[in-house]
Image (tube, helix red, strand yellow):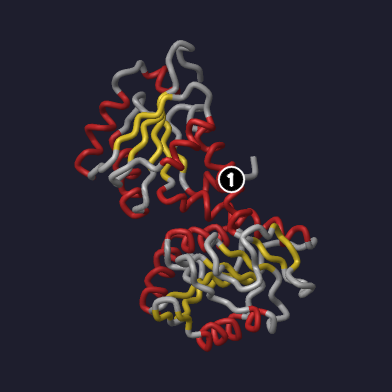
Amino acid sequence: MEGDERTKKILIYLSVEKYASPFDLFQAYDAVDDLIVIPYTGVEMDDVPELINDTIFPRRPKDLINTAIFIGGHDVVKGDEIMDSAVKQMFDPFKVSIVADPDGSNTTATGCVVKIKEAIEAKGEKLKGKRAIIFAGTGPVGLRVATLLVREGVKVAITSRKIERAIAAVANVEKIYHAEITPYEVKTDKYKIDYESTINALREFNPNIIVTAGPPEITYVKKETWNHFNDLEVMADANAYPPYGIEGVDANDDCKEIENTGKLGIGALRIGSVKNDLQKKIIRKLFEKKGMVIRLEDIYATAFE
């Protein structure tokens, strides 16, 4: 489908935050030549219908291939709600392509799983059937990592400071994907981890893969802990701020063997490299076809195109 060549490509950027994210804007401008980005910030749910109407109606339907929507900001829950509301407001033939990636959660989670899959396959093995535990896994990135790993046939466990929160998060993923996920409680007091509960979770679940997806400056798994687990193959840390989430895994590690242990480390900057390239790719994809709704699974599939 092609629109009028004279119709400029316009990306409508929606965010609930006070300011538009410079990161997201840089990515958009670097992704598409001569792109115009129009940011709307402080967006409330009641604002969405009118904003969408004013986005889809100024152009002829065939020219809407050159209009797209990107939902950013830091509030992942509200970002997803805006996405759902925007999609409901559009109708044939007045549809534009849309994606939500608030706080980079979808592209970061995809980058993490892409690197894990790369590390496992480099060993001549398959991801399906492996066991992965995600520490601090009830946040946006952790749950999306869990979702993608489940879709790859991985047996998954997630941890939280409170077992009730872990159970609730597991229920949400299981409801959609009908997969059994194991919840664990790993207690934290500010920046202090109860390493005994960490060890207990690792002993019981005996993972091949460890992922840490929690707040920065917290070490969730010490080297003296992970070094004792012989079945552990890959460790991925989504935190770019030292001290890192997994002791011994540096932010720059790219499927690197850690200190001759046979275990491969994946750092946040290597995950971020995939994430950044993928976000640009997704933004370009928005202008390839009219009316696409690009969700987590679509973002993951795009990473392998």
Residue 248 x/y as whole percent: 66, 71
Residue sitting farthest toward the left: 46
Q: Nearer the viewer, residue 43 or 51?
A: 43
Q: Residue at x 48, y 81 (%)?
A: 193
Task: From this view, report whether residue 282 is shown above or below residue 198.
Answer: above
Q: Residue at x 56, y 48 (%)?
A: 275
Q: Is residue 107 left or right of residue 120?
A: left
SS class, disc 1: helix
Q: Nearer the viewer, residue 70 or 151?
A: 70
Q: Which residue is mark 1?
A: 301
Q: Nearer the viewer, residue 253 or 291?
A: 253
Q: Which residue type carries mark 1? A: Ala
Q: Nearer the viewer, residue 242 or 73?
A: 242
Task: From this view, report whether residue 42 is shown above or below residue 187.
Answer: above
Q: Is residue 210 left or right of residue 82?
A: right
Residue 129 x/y as whole percent: 66, 68
Q: Where, by quadrant of the figure, is residue 50 drawn?
A: top left
Residue 152 x/y as whole percent: 61, 59
Q: Residue at x 67, y 58 (%)?
A: 117
Q: Residues within 10 Å of mark 1 (few under 14, many from 20)?
A: few
Residue 207 x/y as whole percent: 63, 75
- The quadrant of the rendering that contains the C terminus is top right
Q: Is residue 156 left or right of residue 47?
A: right
Q: Residue at x 44, y 76 (%)?
A: 191
Q: Where, by quadrant of the figure, is residue 204 drawn?
A: bottom right
